[in-house]
Image: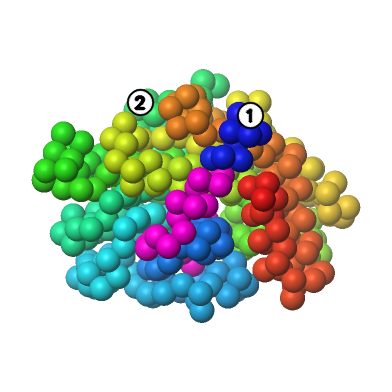
Amino acid sequence: MGIIILNLVRNYMKNFFKGKKILITGHTGFKGAWLSQILLEFGAEVIGISLPPATEPSLFGVLGLEKRTRTHYQDIRDFSSLKKIFEKEKPEIVFHLAAQALVRDSYDDPLTTFSSNVMGTANVLQAIKEVGGVKAAVIITTDKVYANNELPNPYRETDPLGGYDPYSSSKAAADIVTSSYIKSFFNINDFGRKHNTLVAIARAGNVIGGGDWANDRLVPDIVRSIYDRKEEIVLRNPKAVRPWQHVLDPLRGYMMLARELYEKNTAIVGAWNFGPYPNESITVEELVKEAIKILETGSYRVEADTGKHEAGLLTLDINKAKAELKWEPLVTFTQSIKMTFDWYREYHEQRDKIVEFTNKQIRDYLKE
């Protein structure tokens, strides 16, 4: 994508979101906090529905987002309360990110995982349907929705869905629920007559970036081992290949979807992959080595854990997003790692400047 065209797209996106009333579920989470920060910088009115932050610290807290968004601490499994928030706030655009998002936690508590991810998604879609007024909804699932055969071929949007573990299968089920709502209630053939809402599904890979402190995630584990525990990083599955990408890349894809849906582009309805280029899918061990190099400290050891199955190989085909949405990754794997660990270094060395640093990363990414 040429520099001039890219700048036009970025400026258009910023101008588009200014003044829009946007509801984000899961805005207290890692991706939700980054998305909230970007949209606030764009001048949007951000409403959030979420449980309180699951970690301390949290990016939501570090950025002071509770004071800058209209936050509703609400479990999305409570449909009646959820619907009342929609009726009160009357959002134009919805980004649904709220979920139980950890594979290993899903083994320990599968019922919460299924109820949050499947019925929570159905509740959000039903609230949109019953209340009306939402013009664009982007439902975020995951790259793990695919029936993973551990083969090197990247998964396309038309490939079969599946899911070995409770997390993956719950997100595949949420994906199917969303497709059902699109066909049954938000069908493009009925658009403008029976409804005025267009819905897309976003499937992204393993996102990294500053401000993630979740348990059992690689980057937070690296940060805790180096900065807090002063001990070796423990790798469970060092050869596992993941489509690592900086959080700003898929979030830009989500926002591009929302803009196109809002502007009544019915061709955008359906599922979309957002991931790195194929040669940018890197092993866990390679990521750790790169992080240690950037931070100039740390070491690791391998302690294989075969008790809870996790996919060994997973890559996404992003040709649809490139061709039809004109989206492509802007940040390489090396740049993503540097941006991520530069953020954590800034947080630990100059915490009072972390909001300014976060905004600078956003501006640099957008080349403003």
Residue 145 in the image: x percent, y percent?
40, 38
Label 1: how many Cα within 10 Å (few below 14, some 14–19, many 20+): few
The image quadrant that residue 19 belongs to is: bottom left
Left or right of 280? Residue 50 is: left
Name the secondary structure under disc 1.
loop
Question: In the rendered image, which quarter contains the N terminus?
Answer: top right
Q: Which residue is depicted at the point 15% across and 59% down? A: 130
Q: Is residue 255 visible?
A: yes
Q: Reading the chain from its start, which is encountered first: label 2 or label 1?
A: 1
Amino acid at pointer 1: Gly
Mark 2 or 1, closer to the camera: 1
Residue segment shown in magenta: 10-33
Disc number for residue 89: none
Left or right of 237? Residue 337 is: right
Q: Which residue is depicted at the point 61% across and 40% down? A: 7
Amino acid at pointer 2: Thr
Find the distance from the CA under tag 2 to the CA under tag 1. 29 Å
Residue 233 in the image: x percent, y percent?
75, 53
How are the colours assigned in the image? Answer: rainbow
Residue 245 in the image: x percent, y percent?
61, 42
- Residue with the mark numbered 1: 2
Disc number for residue 158: 2
Name the secondary structure under disc 2.
loop
User: Which sits in the foreground, 193 or 70?
Assistant: 193
The image quadrant that residue 260 belongs to is: top left
Residue 176 in the image: x percent, y percent?
27, 40
